[in-house]
Image (tube, grey):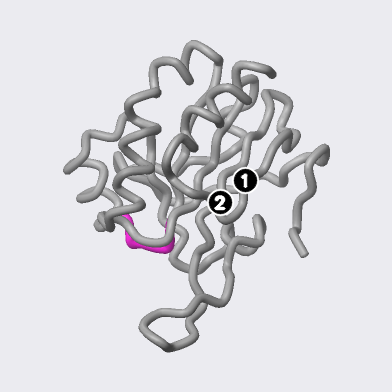
């Protein structure tokens, strides 16, 4: 069961991020926030998803919406990923899975015939007052960023 529910306030969080900084939800008060969780930096689906959010970034900003990407990768891996694809938004490192567990995105997956625990590609839209307004779980990348932008524009 999710630690958060649509319509409820999201507890503040703080994680190390690209750009040699720490990002906290409370730092973004007054703005909508998209938090997208992805399994692994610099893999095909995660790259495409990041590029799609990057390509719509200015439209998200026009909708008073910040974007945060999150995975269990190290800050260094996130820095390399962000630099390689010129992501204008921070990527957060959740190595100890604190935020992943807060949003309940760790799931059993089948990898090459073995069961492993991994990040289920998921996105959350938090409004400017810190309330969760939408969630997408088991995300398919194609068209997803545009759907999230549409939801952000409706807030």
Name the residue beneath numbered marker 2. 122
Outermost residue toward the top in this view: 62
- In three-dimensional space, the C-alpha distance between marks 2 and 1, rounded to whole angstroms, equals 5 Å
Q: Position of residue 70 (x, y in %)?
A: 45, 51
Spot occupied by residue 136 in the image (x, y as percentages of width and height)? 62, 45
Residue at image x 73%, y 33%?
133
Q: Position of residue 117 (x, y in %)?
A: 51, 77
User: How many marks can you see?
Assistant: 2
The C terminus - image quarter? top right
Q: Earlier in the sequence, mark 2 or mark 1?
A: 2
Helix, strand or loop at mark 1: strand
**Residue pushed farthest bottom?**
114
Q: Nearer the viewer, residue 133 or 26?
A: 133
The residue tagged with tag 2: helix, strand or loop?
Answer: strand
Residue at position x 42%, y 63% in the image: 72
Residue 72 magenta-highlighted: yes
Q: Looking at the image, is 127 positioned above or below residue 38?
A: above
> In the picture shown, does residue 112 fall above or below 99?
below
Quadrant of res 6: top right
- Read off the residue under disc 1: 136
Q: Which residue range is magenta in the image?
A: 71-75
Q: Residues within 10 Å of mark 2 (few under 14, many from 20)?
A: many
Q: Are marks 2 and 1 in contact (CB under 8 Å)?
A: yes
């Amino acid at each position: 069961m999710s630690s958060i529910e649509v319509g409820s306030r999201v507890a503040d969080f703080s994680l190390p991020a690209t750009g040699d900084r720490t990002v906290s939800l409370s730092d973004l008060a007054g703005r909508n926030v998209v938090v997208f969780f992805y399994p692994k930096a610099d893999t095909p689906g995660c790259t495409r998803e990041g590029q799609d959010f990057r390509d719509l970034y200015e439209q998200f900003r026009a909708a008073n919406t910040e974007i945060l990407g999150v995975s269990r990768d190290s800050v260094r891996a996130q820095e390399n990923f962000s630099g390689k694809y010129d992501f204008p938004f921070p990527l957060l490192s959740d190595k100890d899975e604190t935020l992943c567990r807060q949003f309940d995105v760790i799931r059993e997956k089948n990898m090459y015939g073995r069961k492993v625990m991994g990040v289920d590609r998921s996105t959350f839209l938090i409004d400017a007052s810190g309330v969760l307004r939408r969630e997408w779980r088991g995300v398919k990348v194609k068209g997803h960023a545009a759907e999230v932008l549409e939801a952000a524009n409706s807030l």
